[in-house]
Amino acid sequence: MNVNILIAEDEEDIRQLVTLHLAKEGYEVFEASNGVEALEIFTRERIDLIILDIMMPEMDGFALLQRIRKRSKVPVIMLTARTEEADKILGLGLGADDYVIKPFSVIELISRVNAQLRRYMEYNPMKAPEDKLRNGGIVMDLDDYSVEKDGVSIELNPKEFKMLRLFLENPGKIFTKKQIYESVWDEPYVGDNNTLMVHVSHLRDKIETDPKDPEYIKTIRGIGYRMDDKDDKAK
């Protein structure tokens, strides 16, 4: 199985240089130039390690790290040009696994990436990171692309699977119709509400006890949809 690395860095020269060296190591690399773009990639793809710059537009590294740690334990290496001890303490306190100060040696960064992945895989030897997603009675296995609800297998088509994965990875988050469409269909949204509504309806038919009164996928009128966080409500 390929190892996927996400680098979130707004300085293009640094991002491309690191990407080049990671690719030479055999890693699959996803690039983001801001925090919002990075979160969208993390939501859409199976990411095994993140290289995360602190100072980014739209959503900084600290805010993004908090969002990531709510649902994933993948290794995170933070990059910063700031040398304040408080920044390092904050980053590590939020769940960063390592910290690299700019300017840095790319060779050293790659060594740190390799070390973090070895350590992570050592404690997760059976499967790749984040192989199952859960919310309430729904369980999605990302290895064999299977879905169960309350122990009963559910057959989903590829679009339904991608949509459900998006919701499961972001419980409680409201998605606009545009965000859902572009994430699931991988093409620009041109206002085709009917296609999206039909797929949401079919997905509800398969996962909801009463599709007309859904307990998982809720319609947010005038905006889009949200999956309620059943695990959070149970606490």
Image (cartoon, grey):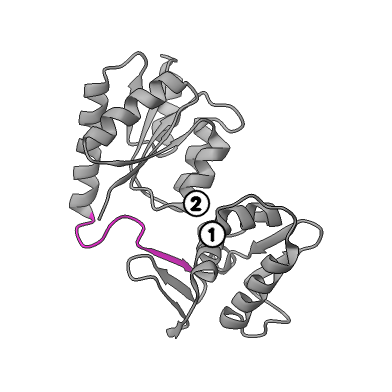
Q: Residue at x 24, y 43 (%)?
A: 117
Count of labels shown?
2
- Label 1's element? helix
- What amino acid type should be assigned to the residue bearing mark 2? Thr
Indicate the position of residue 155 as horizontal and vertical percent values.
Answer: 47, 81
Residue farthest along the right direction in this orientation: 222
Do callouts 2 and 1 mark residues in contact (Cβ within 8 Å)? yes
- Is residue 90 among what the camera can see? yes
Give the position of the N terminus as an image quadrant. bottom left
Q: Is residue 184 left or right of residue 193?
A: left
> Is residue 214 within the magenta segment?
no
Q: Is residue 58 left or right of residue 122?
A: right
150 lies above or below 51: below
Please state the extent of the stretch shown in magenta in the rendering. Answer: 124-134
230 lies above or below 8: below
Q: Residue at x 27, y 22 (%)?
A: 106
Residue identified by numbered label 1: 166
Indicate the position of residue 5 as horizontal and vertical percent values.
Answer: 34, 41
Q: Which mark is residue 112?
A: none
Indicate the position of residue 31 as horizontal and vertical percent values.
Answer: 44, 36
Mark nearer the N terminus (2 vs 1): 2
Q: CA distance from mark 2 to mark 1?
A: 6 Å
- Pick the residue in front: 164 or 76: 164
> For residue 24, which quarter of the picture?
top left
Q: Is residue 182 left or right of residue 13?
A: right
Residue identified by numbered label 2: 43
Q: Residues within 10 Å of mark 2 (few under 14, many from 20)?
A: some
- Is residue 173 among what the camera can see? no
- Label 2's element? helix
Q: Residue at x 18, y 51 (%)?
A: 122
Q: Residue at x 39, y 21 (%)?
A: 14
- What is the chief secondary structure element of the magenta stretch? loop
